[in-house]
Amino acid sequence: MSSLNPKSKICAVIPFYNEKDFILNVVRETLKYVDKVIAVNDGSTDLSEKQIVDLESVNILNLKSNKGKGRALQVGFDECVNSNFNFIVTIDGDNQHDPKYIPEFIEKLNSFNIVIGNRLKDTKSMPLQRILSNKITSFFLSLKTGQNIPDSQCGFRAYKKEVLQNVRTSCSGYEAESEILIYASRKGFKIGFVNIPTTYGEEKSKMNAVGAIIGFIKVLFK
């Protein structure tokens, strides 16, 4: 397959909720590798958005209340597609993902339609419960999609525009990221991976474990 057009436009969607300690660094680092950042403020109450309001090439979309990661992502996707970006990267706002891997994700889109970060090659700093839940959900999602998905829970991803023009998530929570993969697979889109390090520091997960499991089970039966 031919190389990607060097003039292709890249946009990053960064959903965030109460990330005032991390969002400025995440956005600044991401801007080194993309043309535009769509930062979706999912109803933050700590004024996180004020940290990035003066940055160039950043469009902040403010949701009036906390809608959930899935809803925040879809709002960002719609903005990217309407702005005619060729490639869309998603990265979490809590400093768990290193934006320096973005070029590797984009390069991998030569061969795939969706590229996901795979943290399970290096799980030294990943909590045991996260390893187990990830392996279980990845196993069932691989069966459901008919494609190998080693890390279904990673929010560091890259999409070709065509995927997000044809696939929309109806879920509001974290399960939306699994739902996208199911719908994309049904339409024949191919999923690839980039190995990335596991990074867990001072940030606190906002995932409700029980709610996420219930949401994932519902998605599996769609």
Image (spheres, helix red, strand yellow):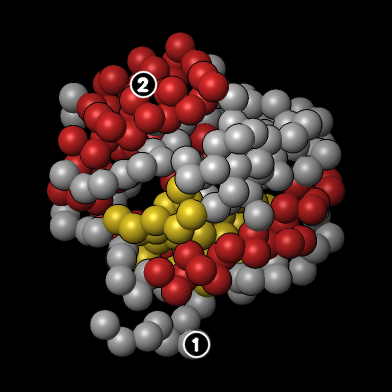
Q: Quadrant of residue 216?
A: top left
| Amino acid, disc 2 | Gly
Vertical side of 30 occupied by 41: above or below: above
Q: Quadrant of residue 210?
A: top left
Q: In x, y percent, where is residue 182?
A: 24, 41
Task: Name the residue at 48% across, 54% down.
Answer: 195
Vertical side of 2 occupied by 191: above or below: above
Relative placement, left or right, of 61 versus 166 is right
- Dot 2: few (<14), some (14–19), or many (≥20) neighbours within 10 Å? some
Q: Which residue is mark 2?
A: 215
Task: Name the residue at 22% across, 58% down.
Answer: 189
Q: Nearer the viewer, residue 53 or 138?
A: 138
Q: Earlier in the sequence, mark 2 or mark 1?
A: 1
Q: Are marks 2 and 1 in contact (CB under 8 Å)?
A: no
Residue 105 visible to an observer of this rendering: yes
Q: Nearer the viewer, residue 80 or 186?
A: 186
Q: Secondary structure at mark 1?
A: loop
Q: In x, y percent, where is residue 2?
A: 31, 87
Q: Secondary structure at mark 2?
A: helix
Q: Nearer the viewer, residue 2 or 120?
A: 120
Q: Which mark is residue 7?
A: 1
CA gap, disc 2 to disc 1? 39 Å
- Quadrant placement of the N terminus: bottom left
Q: In x, y percent, where is residue 85?
A: 47, 71
Relative placement, left or right, of 152 versus 44 is left
| Amino acid, disc 1 | Lys
Q: Quadrant of residue 98?
A: bottom right
Q: Residue furthest top?
A: 210
Residue 64 visible to an observer of this rendering: no
Vertical side of 111 occupied by 190: above or below: above
Task: Name the residue at 79% across, 53% down.
Answer: 25
Task: Name the residue at 16% across, 57% down.
Answer: 188
